[in-house]
Image: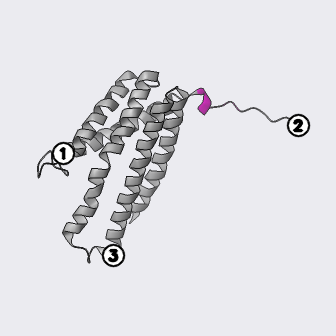
Amino acid sequence: KAHRNLTGLALVFFLFFLGSLVSRLRAAGEARLATVALGGGLVTAGVWVGWMSLEASLTWDLVNDVPAGDVKVLLGTADFGFPIPLATLVGATSIAAWRSRIWPTWLSMIGMFSAVWIVVGGAALMGDGFFSPHGGYRLVGFLLFFVWLLLAAIFMLVRPTEDENPVAVPATM
């Protein structure tokens, strides 16, 4: 049960990251791509909440009353719901960062590659094996997303903008 609480806390941190990221992209002059990234991130968060809700309610006490096939279908919806908004977030952010040079070009290239990989993984519909919905191809896409997310967060921390670290001005009476 603790994993549900930790996952909810991770969602809060993801939304904080998303807000910081979008602010950074807007400040760099990439307002349109920042809005696209925000949309992708918010839809990702919505799918995440839906998936967590389904998982929590199924594990709470309903799992004994629901046929295994139905459980698989319900939990599998996240596999089909995540790829497009994730790819939108990563792709729009990476293009905006590449154009504005807010972080190294190699990180933007990793992001663009990851976005394409995630979209193709979202279309992986083989019955079994590496290209199945639960196969390795899609898992590699999620791994690429988390690596990109970590690297983007690190670069945002080590390269703060002037707006994010204002100098304190003493109050006068």
Q: Residue type at mark 2?
A: Met
Of residues 159 and 65, which is closer to you in this image? 65
Count neighbours of disc 2 (C-alpha within 10 A) and say few if under 14, some if 14 to 19, many if 20 or more. few
Q: Which residue is mark 3?
A: 61
Q: Which residues are magenta?
A: 162-168
| Residue pointed to by mark 2 | 173
Q: Mark 2 to mark 1: distance in Å?
A: 65 Å
Circles 2 and 3 in contact, beta carbons < 8 Å: no
Q: Is residue 48 left or right of residue 116?
A: right
In this picture, is 52 found above or below 68?
A: above
Residue 105 vertical placement versus 1 (above, below): above
Residue 162: x, y in percent? 60, 27
**Relative horizontal placement of residue 31, taking residue 69 as reference (left or right):** right
Going 27% across and 40% down the picture, which residue do you hit? 118
Residue 57 position in % (x across, y down): 36, 69
- Between the C-alphas of marks 1 and 3, the distance is 32 Å
**Residue wearing tag 1:** 124
The amino acid marked with disc number 3 is Asp
